[in-house]
Image (cartoon, rainbow, N blue to C red):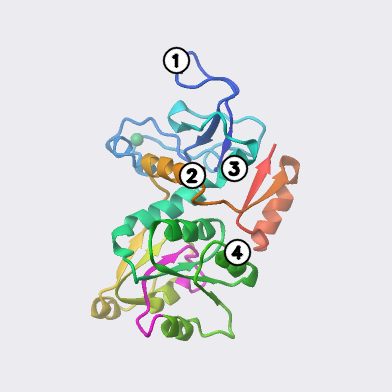
């Protein structure tokens, strides 16, 4: 386990020349050979030559040491503080996934547009900051937890909606958007009716970007065409996007909310995560 990793180089093979021992590094989430067309385009997530993700398909960062390939290693400034190195770990999947989703529809996020961030977890709280930093859009954050909505406000959400039986979030969203709905909905939940709500919250000719998963998309084709709704899937991101995102962090444009645990507390961190008690992202520190 452990697919979002930063650390210091401990050792490397004789054919590796571009890193030194103790260099601070962040790891791209996929390990690929880099020769197929998709890899050459930077789309390693669609590698056709047996890609794998440490932490999911192989042993990952729930350890004091982990093995990787040089292609996945992205060097960070040697002057980086250990505190930042720990906080940056979630950029390796949560961050890059949020950034890629936003970059996909970036030209559509014009000034005077409204963007919904559905789910203010590890991805959502970073997404809010990226949108805030790169666009002039108004941001509506939706979550089932009031605490997470407070986090959303802290990081720049203009309006928050508590997803609960007592709240008609569609009515409140329509009021905020003068009965138009949102230009873009980023669905970082992807289950528990979020897809159904996303389609109701988006405006005519608007776009729903599906990032979270687990649920089923059900919508009448008539409704999609009569309102010209775009639905886009989004998966992790590219190397170049990864470096852009890292630069945003280094420039202080985005922060990562982390709750730190000792490696021995991994089970406790997992339990808190399952119960929705983690603010931002949990990070294990060996
Ligand atoms: Zn490849």
Residue at left offset 43%, top offset 60%? 131
Marks 4 & 2, CB-CB < 8 Å contact: no
Residue at left offset 33%, top offset 36%? 39
Point out the tag, 2 or 1, that comes first from the N-terminus: 1
- Residue pointed to by mark 3: 2
Q: What stretch is highlighted in magenta?
A: 177-194
Measured in 3D between alpha carbons, the distance from the residue under mark 4 to the one under mark 2, in whole angstroms, is 21 Å
- Residue pointed to by mark 2: 251
Foreground of the two, 65 or 17: 17
Marks 1 & 3, CB-CB < 8 Å contact: no
Point out the tag, 3 or 2, that comes first from the N-terminus: 3
Measured in 3D between alpha carbons, the distance from the residue under mark 4 to the one under mark 3, in whole angstroms, is 24 Å
Task: Check disc 2: other Cα within 10 Å, few if <14, some if 14-19, many if 20+.
Answer: few
Coordinates of residue 151 in the picture (x, y in percent): 60, 64
Q: In this view, does 14 lie to the left or right of 115?
A: right
Q: Is residue 90 magenta?
A: no
Q: Is residue 187 above or below residue 220?
A: above
In this rendering, which labeled residue sits more in front, label 2 or label 1? 2
Task: Check disc 1: other Cα within 10 Å, few if <14, some if 14-19, many if 20+.
Answer: few
Measured in 3D between alpha carbons, the distance from the residue under mark 2 to the one under mark 1, in whole angstroms, is 33 Å
Q: In this view, does 214 lie above or below 169?
A: above
- Residue pointed to by mark 1: 15
Coordinates of residue 237 in the picture (x, y in percent): 40, 47
Residue at left offset 47%, top offset 28%? 69
Marks 4 & 1, CB-CB < 8 Å contact: no
Point out the tag, 4 or 2, that comes first from the N-terminus: 4
Foreground of the two, 144 or 113: 113
Query: The residue tagged with tag 2: helix, strand or loop?
Result: loop
Q: Does the magenta stretch include residue 184?
A: yes
């Amino acid at each position: 386990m452990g697919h979002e990793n930063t650390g210091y180089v401990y050792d490397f093979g004789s054919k590796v020349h571009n890193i030194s021992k103790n260099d601070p590094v962040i790891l791209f989430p996929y390990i690929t050979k880099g020769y197929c067309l998709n890899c050459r385009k930077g789309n390693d997530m669609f590698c056709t030559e047996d890609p794998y993700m440490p932490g999911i398909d192989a042993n990952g960062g729930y350890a004091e040491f982990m093995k990787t390939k040089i292609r996945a290693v992205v060097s960070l400034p040697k002057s980086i503080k250990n505190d930042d190195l720990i906080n940056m770990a979630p950029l390796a999947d949560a961050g890059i996934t949020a950034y890629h989703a936003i970059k996909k529809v970036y030209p559509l996020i014009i000034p005077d547009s409204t963007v919904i961030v559905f789910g203010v977890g590890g991805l959502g709280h970073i997404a809010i900051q990226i949108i805030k930093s790169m666009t002039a859009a108004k941001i509506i954050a939706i979550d089932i937890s009031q605490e997470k909505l407070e986090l959303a406000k802290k990081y720049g959400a203009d309006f928050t909606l508590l997803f609960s039986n007592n709240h008609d979030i569609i009515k409140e969203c329509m009021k905020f958007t003068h009965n138009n709905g949102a230009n873009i909905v980023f669905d970082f939940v992807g289950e528990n009716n979020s897809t159904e709500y996303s389609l109701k919250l988006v405006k005519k000719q608007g776009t729903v970007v599906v990032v979270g998963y687990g649920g089923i998309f059900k919508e009448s084709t008539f409704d999609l065409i009569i309102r010209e709704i775009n639905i886009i899937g989004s998966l992790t991101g590219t190397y170049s996007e990864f470096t852009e995102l890292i630069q945003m962090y280094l420039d202080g444009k985005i922060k990562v909310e982390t709750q730190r645990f000792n490696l021995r507390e991994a089970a406790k961190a997992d339990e808190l995560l399952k119960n929705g008690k983690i603010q931002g992202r949990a990070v294990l520190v060996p």
